[in-house]
């Protein structure tokens, strides 16, 4: 049983990361479908809990060909930009959120849409907790639409990425989620 | 934002105590706009040098009080040399 967010935030950082629920590639390949019928308002999504180092930040900068020095050049970040360290990327948060919601919807569901804000300065060594909770659900055109609120909290519970989104899930015994996805009229 | 440096004394300070002082993010980022950039410790001789970025010198002084270390002076920094680069503050 996954730990609840409120309980997780009571733990020490080194204990928090032990509760990371990021699935392996193999687990995703074999993932059983989550149906709309099984989703309840208030249920939490799997939490992806990480503690990134500056090496991870550099890897993302290289991947994105993002040469902005505040993400990898420590002397420049602290002395020129007056930051507490090199910073976790906004574009990385965006990518993590998209992957996380996609993972949750696999294999027949679809991450439809989401919006969020990038707040707070996250430096290497901080814990990032990608969390989410179902806040509403309804069926439109035979497709199960699940609304979630989510964010990325640090080890102190400070929210750095408040957002919300909609995931389309198949209804058990229903017509399924079309591929490619066609947004239903809501 | 401004950079300050404090020079002080912490007789008997141990490595464990020094680590304890900084082992949580909120301990060194003690305010949304204030953080300890670097801290130097001379074990045995009980000397400490602390570098802090903050808009208010008073916030740094408050943090220093909590350490229990004897602070001989807190100074505003104008220039920093780091790995061949000079950074005006």
Image (tube, coloured by chain):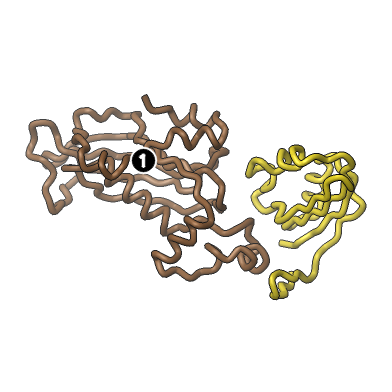
Chain colours: A brown, B yellow
Residue closest to the eye, B42 or B23: B42
Visible in this render: residue B72? yes
Visible in this render: residue B66? no
| Residue shown at 78% from the left, 71% from the top | B79
Residue A77 is situated, as x and y percent measured from the top left of the image, at 61, 64
Judged left or right of residue B5, residue A3 is left
Residue lying furthest top in this view? A1
Quadrant where the image shows the N terminus of chain B:
bottom right
Crowdedness of circle 1 by 10 Å Cα count: few (<14), some, many (20+)? Answer: some
Which picture quadrant has residue B4? bottom right
Residue A2 is situated, as x and y percent measured from the top left of the image, at 38, 28
| Residue shown at 16% from the left, 42% from the top | A108
Quadrant where the image shows the C terminus of chain B:
bottom right
Residue A82 is situated, as x and y percent measured from the top left of the image, at 65, 63
Q: Which residue is mark 1?
A: A22
Residue B58 is situated, as x and y percent measured from the top left of the image, at 81, 51
Image vertical order of residue A141 relative to residue A95, above or below: above
Residue lying furthest front in this view? B44
Which picture quadrant has residue B51? bottom right
- Which chain is disc 1 placed on? A
| Residue shown at 69% from the left, 71% from the top | B83
């Amino acid at each position: 049983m996954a730990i609840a967010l409120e309980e997780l935030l009571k733990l020490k950082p080194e204990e928090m990361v032990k509760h990371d629920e990021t699935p392996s590639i193999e687990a995703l390949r074999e993932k059983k479908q989550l149906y709309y019928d099984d989703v309840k308002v208030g249920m939490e999504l799997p939490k992806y809990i990480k503690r990134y180092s500056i090496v991870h930040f550099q890897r993302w900068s290289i991947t994105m060909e993002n040469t902005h020095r505040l993400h990898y050049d420590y002397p420049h970040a602290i002395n020129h930009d007056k930051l507490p360290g090199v910073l976790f990327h906004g574009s990385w948060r965006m990518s993590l959120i998209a992957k996380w919601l996609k993972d949750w919807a696999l294999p027949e569901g679809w991450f439809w849409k989401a919006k969020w804000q990038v707040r707070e300065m996250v430096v290497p060594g901080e814990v990032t907790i990608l969390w989410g909770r179902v806040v509403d659900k309804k069926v439109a055109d035979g497709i199960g639409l699940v609304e979630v609120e989510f964010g990325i909290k640090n080890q102190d519970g400070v929210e750095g990425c408040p957002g919300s989104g909609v995931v389309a899930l198949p209804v058990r015994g229903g017509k399924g989620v079309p591929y490619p996805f066609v947004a239903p009229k809501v | 934002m401004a950079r300050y440096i404090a020079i002080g004394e912490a007789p008997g300070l141990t490595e464990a105590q020094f680590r304890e002082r900084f082992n949580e993010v909120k301990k060194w980022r003690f305010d949304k706009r204030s953080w300890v950039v670097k801290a130097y410790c001379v074990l045995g001789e009980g000397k400490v040098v602390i570098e802090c970025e903050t808009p208010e010198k008073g916030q740094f002084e408050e943090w220093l009080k909590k350490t229990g270390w004897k602070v001989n002076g807190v100074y505003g920094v104008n220039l920093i040399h780091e790995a061949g680069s000079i950074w005006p503050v």
